Image (cartoon, helix red, strand yellow):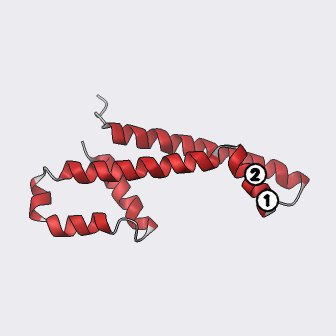
Amino acid sequence: MKPILSKAQLDYMKAKNSFENRAKVMEKEIAAKRALQEITQEVMEELVQTTGFHDAYNDLVTAENALIEWSHTTIKHEKTYRENRGAIDAMYENVNSSPEKRQELIQLSMKIR
């Protein structure tokens, strides 16, 4: 049986898939352009916009932020949270201190049921 996921988790999965698909399209476009011309900053900026990569990235960040906020709200009802409130709140406050910490928190948020 499939696990039941929250709206925040589903939205994150959808945004992540969209971002990965846009990244693949952009990689193909870069390869095609590279065969014809040098890839300058202007060319790269144009590709980021025309492939939808920029919008997909923004949607992914928005979904990540919503997932992190949802997980913080959700775990507040757990006994473990009440016992370790300071450490857990500090982890959420420092979520943007490094990409690794942010990714770890996102992965943990996807495991909440």
Q: Residue at x 31, y 30 (%)?
A: 2
Residue ranking furthest to the top: 1
The numbered disc on residue 5 is none
| Amino acid bearing label 1 | Glu
Q: Are marks 2 and 1 in contact (CB under 8 Å)?
A: yes
Q: Residue at x 79, y 59 (%)?
A: 42
From the viewer's perspective, tell me whether residue 89 is left or right of residue 8: left
Quadrant the C terminus occupies: top left
Q: Secondary structure at mark 2?
A: helix
- Residue 9, compared with residue 105, is above or below; it is above
| Residue, disc 2 | 46
| Residue, disc 1 | 42
Residue closer to the observer: 49 or 85 = 49
Quadrant the N terminus occupies: top left
| Amino acid bearing label 2 | Glu
Residue ranking furthest to the right: 36
**Residue 9 spot, x, y in % from top left:** 36, 42
From the viewer's perspective, tell me whether residue 35 is left or right of residue 9: right
- Residue 101, compared with residue 27, is above or below; it is below
Q: Residue at x 33, y 47 (%)?
A: 110
Asked which quadrant contains residue 11, the reply is: top left
**Residue 100 spot, x, y in % from top left:** 42, 66
Q: Residue at x 74, y 50 (%)?
A: 47
- The residue carrying pointer 1 sits among few (fewer than 14), some (14 to 19) or many (20 or more) residues within 10 Å by Cα, namely few
| C-alpha gap between disc 2 and disc 1 | 6 Å
**Residue 101 spot, x, y in % from top left:** 38, 66
- The residue carrying pointer 2 sits among few (fewer than 14), some (14 to 19) or many (20 or more) residues within 10 Å by Cα, namely few
